[in-house]
Image: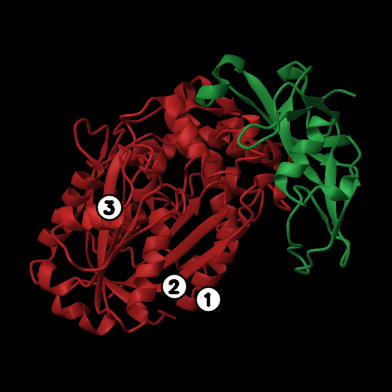
Chain colours: A red, B green
Amino acid sequence: MTGKPLVSIVSAGLARFGRREGIYGRELFAEAAKEAFERCPELDPKKDIENLIVGHMGESYEHQGHTGPTVCDWAGLLPIPSVRTESACASSGTALRLGILSILSGMYDIAMVGGVEKMTSRTTPEVTEFLAMASDFPFEQWHGITFPGLYALMATVHMHKYGTTEEQMAMVAVKNHHNGALNPKAHMQREVTLEKAMSSRVIAWPLKLYDCSLITDGASCIIMTKPELAKRFTDTPVHITGSGHASDAIGLYEREEFTTVSAAKLAGREAYKMAGIDHHKLDVAEVHDCFTIAEIIAYEDLGFCKPGEGGTLVENGLTTIEGKIPVNTSGGLKSKGHPVGATGTAQAYEIYLQLTEQAEKRQVDGAEIGLTHNVGGSGATATVHIYRRE
Amino acid sequence: MAEAHPFTIESFYKYVSEGKLMAAKCSRCGTLHLPPRSMCTECFSTDFEWVESGKIGKLLTYTVIHVSPVQFQSMVPYAVGILRLQDGLNLPGMIRGVKPEEIKVGMELKVDFDRTLPSQWPVWPRYFFRPP
């Protein structure tokens, strides 16, 4: 029941997340690439890497589009083919998916996939507006509905239908900040008390400041090969054994239910099936906690608990590093930060560290199988990937 | 006549400027589309007729927005929600004329129209929800 490898990760890199003043997105990407190159001395980047796919959500942040060749150049990889993927906050989750397909196609043996976003040079209202572009313009943005607003609309129904509480949502923040305090590359490396989270200012009721992920600068990448080549580069490859990807209506209002992200459920089902496992086999997961309610919904969509029981799962401590299914050991989007285009492959980076026992203070003992769950917008895109160690 | 309008989002907002909430009904499979679509996404037909939707609905969910995009900053805090209309269609929009603390899931609201804006992309007249 271990699943056949689709591809193997031989290295990974992550530029420190945070407010990185005076540094452009392409420079952040070079920082992530440098780490990935140094982790894998057997790899000659210029000779070996054949394809680059990079997730990037918005050209508005830096007035810079055409991200593929821009970061390809700064990573020293010209003239290999390079392309940007844009799927809102799942931009690099889809880059990861397409990277896998590029190797499975037989056209490439070795590919780099990653993501980048430089967000903090803009004001909060500007970022709020740019992020909202990933929602429906004529019916959501036009009526003043923001991104926190969309997840707040989901939270209101979750509370009404299942009795989920604002305290339970705040507990997701407390847990993820605890983990982020252990991550030297996290944006906000400090603990938050339940009282502080609960008393923070309202962004979109019932979501408060500490229910929201951070506006962050960052970049991330992984290097993947055909499984049979992995051992040429490392003794400890991490295999991707399942990949799922699905779409849904762009407008939240067009969906049957607001308490679940259907695309994530479908992507999860596809990935579990491909990997030949169910959620019981997982040792660690990075899920898309763009808002605390999103992590609670992710537990339910991925089968960690029944619909409506996500709040209880976090309340009972089952998703802490020592818990039954540790979730967001990196600190998640909540504490590590959410440079939107970089998030999908930053999740893969954390799972790579966990499965190669390099997660230091936040290491899950004996972690063998991991999962990443990356959601774009209010759920119109979702990718789920499953990983296992050698 | 209504049939003169193509089945587009722009037409939907032209009707809004006339105080009408119009959906597109597929002539082949009968599916109602709001917003209207240029092709039925159930059966791929391009034959539609306009039907006027009832304006009363039930509030499925809501939020009160305190941090807004630039162009809405003068309005905060403001409430938005998703209304389930009597014919089963969902519509998102702003809720006016109710104190935020008095808004409840399941309450009845009516679609009304603010016709102060012209109706050409990217500026449309806005509909909104208020107590009946």
Q: Position of residue A87 (x, y in %)?
A: 46, 54
> Judging from the image, what secondary structure is the residue with disc 1 in?
helix
Mark 2: which amino acid? Gly
The answer to whether residue A69 is above or below residue A227 is above
Provide the chain ID for the residue under circle 3. A
Q: Alpha carbon of mark 1 to alpha carbon of mark 2: how far? A: 7 Å
The mark found on residue A220 in the picture is 3
The residue sitting at 17% across, 48% down in the picture is: A31
Dot 2 crowding, Cα within 10 Å, few <14, some 14–19, many 20+: many
The answer to whether residue A157 is above or below residue A262 is above
Provide the chain ID for the residue under circle 1. A
Mark 1: which amino acid? Lys
Between B76 and B34, the residue placed more toward the observer is B34
The residue sitting at 41% across, 54% down in the picture is: A91
Dot 1 crowding, Cα within 10 Å, few <14, some 14–19, many 20+: some
Mark 3: which amino acid? Ser
Q: Alpha carbon of mark 1 to alpha carbon of mark 3: how far? A: 27 Å
Q: For mark 1, what is the residue?
A: A273
